[in-house]
Image (spheres, grey):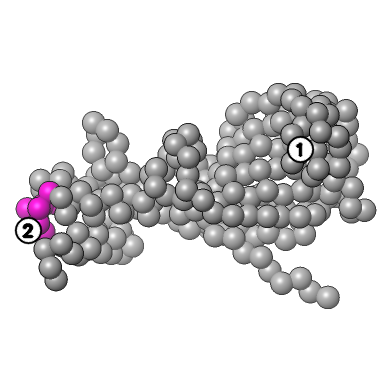
Amino acid sequence: MTRQDKWRDIRAHIEQDIMDGVLEPGAKLPTEPELATAFAAGRHSVRRALAELAKQGLISVEQGRGTFVQAHTLLEYTIGARTRLRKNLGTRGAEITGEALGSEQILASPRVAQSLQSDTGAKVIATKRMTLVGGVPVSFGTLYHDAARFPDFAERRLETGSVTATYATYGINDYLRGNTQMHARPARAAEAQQLRQHPEMPVIVVRAVDTLPDGTPIAFSQVIWSAARVKFNMPTEQD
């Protein structure tokens, strides 16, 4: 192995220790000088190895505190006809929590209007939330509803604790995922900060329309997921 490739050896060694549980979530890594001595490598090689591990979401560098092992459970989210966060998100026992980020009444953009089959500029309620698993942010996004039909959706959502329960208060006892689109892209600075992830770690943008069983759209959502913390499962529909 050349001196230029030394960082790969350092990254692989630390990654293996994390995967084997030698380095547990929350553990503090040695300093850069200590790692350089341990691996008989230069500071540049150590720095690059740590940067690559941070991009993978395996470690986090906290200014003034040090470098720590991240909790790294790859979550599985099933996208099917019925999307219910707590039922569809496989967390292996990890606690799912939600954090309200605010709501507002705005004018529908062309994309939102088209998804809700309403007019551009119609009033909609935009409800923003973050989802955390084990205290780690995995996604955040906005849910849009027609303001005439769901004028106090955000308030009811806070009271009921779930989207499904909130719909029930409007007399809607079942709803389906009508359409889902997703794509990956580099994270924007504000998104990386919101998700507490490395700036070069990508995100997955998921846009979806939920409908009544008869196909009438009731919600449009756009959610930003941390690409290193989730994988999507799309089971084949059975005839």
Which structural element holds mark 1? helix
Q: Which residue is mark 1?
A: 110
Looking at the rendered structure, the number of numbered marks drawn on it comes to: 2
Residue 40 marker: 2
Task: Name the foreground residue: 126 vs 69.
Answer: 126
Residue 96 lies within the magenta run: no
* Residue at (16, 54) in percent of width and height: 45
Number of residues whose C-alpha sits closer than 10 Å to that of mark 1, classed few (under 14), some (14–19) or many (20 or more): some
Decide if residue 170 is in sight here: yes
Location of residue 88 (image quadrant)? bottom right
* Residue at (72, 61) in percent of width and height: 80
Residue type highlighted by circle 2: Ala
x and y, in percent, of residue 115 in the image = 79, 44
Chain part drawn in magenta? 35-43
Number of residues whose C-alpha sits closer than 10 Å to that of mark 2, classed few (under 14), some (14–19) or many (20 or more): few
Residue 51 marker: none
* Quadrant that contains the N terminus: bottom left
Q: State which tag comes first along the sequence, 1 or 2.
A: 2
* Residue at (71, 31) in percent of width and height: 126
Q: CA distance from mark 1 to mark 2?
A: 58 Å
Residue type highlighted by circle 1: Pro
x and y, in percent, of residue 20 in the image = 31, 64
Which structural element holds mark 2? loop
